[in-house]
Image (spheres, rainbow, N blue to C red):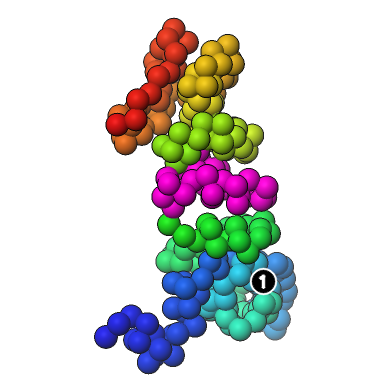
Amino acid sequence: MPFFNLCEKTGLDWFFEQWVRSNKYLCYGVESTESRPDGDGYVSDIRVRRLGSMNMPVPVKAIFEDGSEQIRKTDRNLEIINMKFHSRSGLKEVVLNPENKLAMLQDPLPEISEEAADMLALGWDYTESLEIFETLKEEDISNAWIWYRLGMLLFDSEHYDESFDSFEKVSRMDVSKLYRFAAYTWMGHLKDLLKHRKEAIEYYRLALESDTGDTMKHSQYRMNIDRKWVEQRLESAFTWKKR
């Protein structure tokens, strides 16, 4: 039986539509907590808000001072879910999605256009990289991985100026030093390919300032970007011949 028919038969067609047929994403957050004495124990109020565009029953674990735990699920039909827990001791902590079984974001994504959301939901091919870039370049997309991946696709399709712009976006984001190191290195690569050697050297030097000793591996190019690689680029310009 096809998966959709199974979901439809079991009343889970809403699940199939969101996870498979849409660009919606899952994100819930704890908005407030309150724990107060109540008779011989405590009563705790927990408010959870849906922050993403997908509505799902999300497990909420309440952990109490005596080590006991209780788990309930949100109502997928509500944007704000108020939960009440009764326990012997006060509330210590609240954990959403405690077993990490759901692909849930911790923070909501910035608002983007419907066209950009549809573009992000599709599988990407390097032949479409310029169209993707033109669609996304003015959007408030703070996911560094999206720009890093797009930078490589644009490199593959020899759109070097646009590839540089994508890696530059990564370099300005709050990312790990390894991502910044690799982004600066790619910016140097692209300036070399554009015959701007002096600028390329500046970006290689910026890359070395972010070096952590780790390596960014790109097996598709047989390239391991590490300190030695960048130091070699200071001595000789990056060249590339598409295989």
| Secondary structure character of the magenta stretch overall | helix
Quarter-of-image position of residue 209:
top right
Q: Nearer the viewer, residue 40 or 242?
A: 242
Question: Is 145 situated above or below 196?
Answer: below
In magenta segment, residue 142: yes
Q: Is residue 79 left or right of residue 221?
A: right
What amino acid is at disc 1?
Arg
At 33% from the left and 80% from the top, the residue drawn is 3
Q: Which residue ends up furthest to the left in the rendered image?
A: 1
In the drawing, does residue 96 fall left or right of residue 153? Answer: right
Tell me where the magenta segment starts and ends, as one range: 124-152
Residue 223 horizontal/vertical position (percent):
34, 27
Left or right: 98 as drawn, with respect to 228: right
Q: Is residue 129 magenta?
A: yes
Kindly state the secondary structure of the residue where label 1 is placed.
strand
User: Is residue 43 visible from the viewing direction of this image?
Assistant: no
Q: What's the residue at 53%, 76% (across, down)? A: 56
Quadrant (top left, top right, bottom left, bottom right) of the C terminus:
top left
Q: Residue 224: x and y, percent?
A: 35, 26
Front residue of this view, candidates 184 and 215: 184
What residue appears at the point 34 percent right and 30 percent down from the top-left corner? Answer: 242
Label 1, residues with CA under 10 Å away: few <14, some 14-19, many ≥20: some
Name the residue at the top extreme: 235
Residue 70 percent across, percent down from the top left: 52, 75
**Which residue is identified by label 1?**
49
Rendering quarter of residue 219: top left
Q: Is residue 195 above or below residue 242?
A: above
Residue 101 drawn at (x, y percent) = 42, 66
Residue at point 59%, 34% (across, down): 165
